[in-house]
Image (cartoon, rainbow, N blue to C red):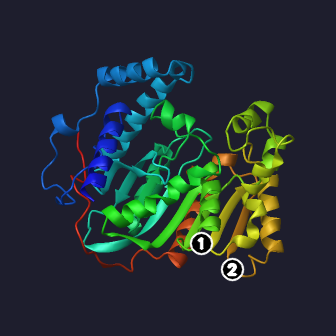
Amino acid sequence: MIARRTHECAARLRLAAVLVAAALPAACSSGGASARSAAVPDRRAYGVASAGDVAAAVDSMARADPSVVARDLAAQVERKRWTDYVFARVLGDEMIVRKTGYFAPDGLAIPAYLFAPLDTARRRPVLLFVHGGVHGDFGVAHLDQVRALVRQGYVVVAPEYRGSTGYGAALYDAIDYGGREVDDVVAARDWLAREVAWADVERLGVMGYSHGGYIALLAVIRRADLFRVAVAHVPVADLPTRMRTHLPEYEALFAAQPAYGASLAENPAPYVARSPSTQARRLRTPVLVHAADNDDDVFIVENRILRDSMVAAGKDRAGLYTYREWHAPPGGHSFGVLDTPEGRESWRETMAFLGRHLPARATRPATGPPLPGPSRRRP
């Protein structure tokens, strides 16, 4: 146990130092300090990394991997650093805000955000909030949604699964679309069960937009035993259709991954196997899907194929599949995160759906040590 904790701590320190996720401290402790510091943490210990720190870390990565410059990983690291800063600055006084990390089943270190109510005396349901993008990251576009979820009483964890940007070449190049990235997200549950006593992992949900919605669907299809609810907004739903409706350069991103190994025409099996539309009969968890018929990224044909598959499998009649399609909402693919009548209505339906299947107010007393370290940060 001590050896494993030492190994985990060392990995988290490497994340903080090498990946420059320094706006928030990585949690690493073998003891149980108060979950909320009584005083404002010292700026020298928890301040934002300087530009020199960023440059030094990126230069070190570039020497080890010359392709870093070609993928502009330096800019990704810098943007991620400021995303961390914004979350801490804007939300840090009203909730626990933490940049942390855990291990995937294959040993890869996965950075993650943790947001939670300041009151840790009672156990609270958990939502895994999955970001979108083939190479994306969890960004401030979701800040108000995180605030709403935490105010409702949820613990929110946003995993930066393999392929995410902002952490250098190793994580970026480990991309496995629809494969191990799903394992990365699900692995957050074990970390919470081990480290965060007031996170009730028996009441677990998952949600996401676009690629994040795709992962949410695959997570509950593959691990129905773990989840009580899923929400998938404008999700990628059918990879063969997606390959046919996008540019060859997009398909090349998939063909270059070992699990795919070739184009759809040359090797269709993984594209089919990793499509939620082909897995409808396995659904056992209530799912809400919102889509837009003017989506210029996930074309509506994908979600209509998923809808038809779910209806054919009887999942709508069983109360497991709830689908709504908006006609020409402002923003198209991004309509659900915009402050428009359509965006607000989508969010109200999301909160209501979560409230039915994963109520946040029915809490139980927490037992065991709280998450170690300070819970908030003020620059």
In this rendering, the answer to whether 323 lies above or below 261 is: below
Report the quarter where the N terminus lies: bottom left
Residue drawn at x 44%, y 58% is 188
Identity of the residue drawn at 74% across and 76% down: 315
Kind of residue indicated by mark 2 = Gly
Closest to the observer, 72 or 110: 110
**Snapshot quadrant of residue 153:** bottom left
Task: From the viewer's perspective, tell me whether residue 29 is left or right of residue 65.
Answer: left
If the image is split into quadrants, where does the C terminus sit?
A: top left
Q: Mark number for residue 224?
A: 1
Circle 2: element type = loop
220 and 98: which is toward the camera: 220
Mark 2 Cα shell of 10 Å, populated few (<14), some (14-19), many (≥20): few
Relative vertical location of residue 316 with respect to residue 211 in this rendering, above or below: below
Task: Decide: is 62 above or below 154.
Answer: above
Mark 1: amino acid: Ala
Is 159 situated left or right of 322 in this image?
Answer: left
- Residue 372: assigned label: none
Mark 1: secondary structure: loop
Residue 165 at least partly seen = no
Q: Which mark, by number, is residue 319?
A: 2
- Label 1 to label 2: alpha-carbon separation: 15 Å
Please state the horizontal and vertical placement of residue 275, each as a whole percent of the image.
74, 56
Position of residue 163 measured from the top left corner of the image (x, y, whole percent): 56, 40
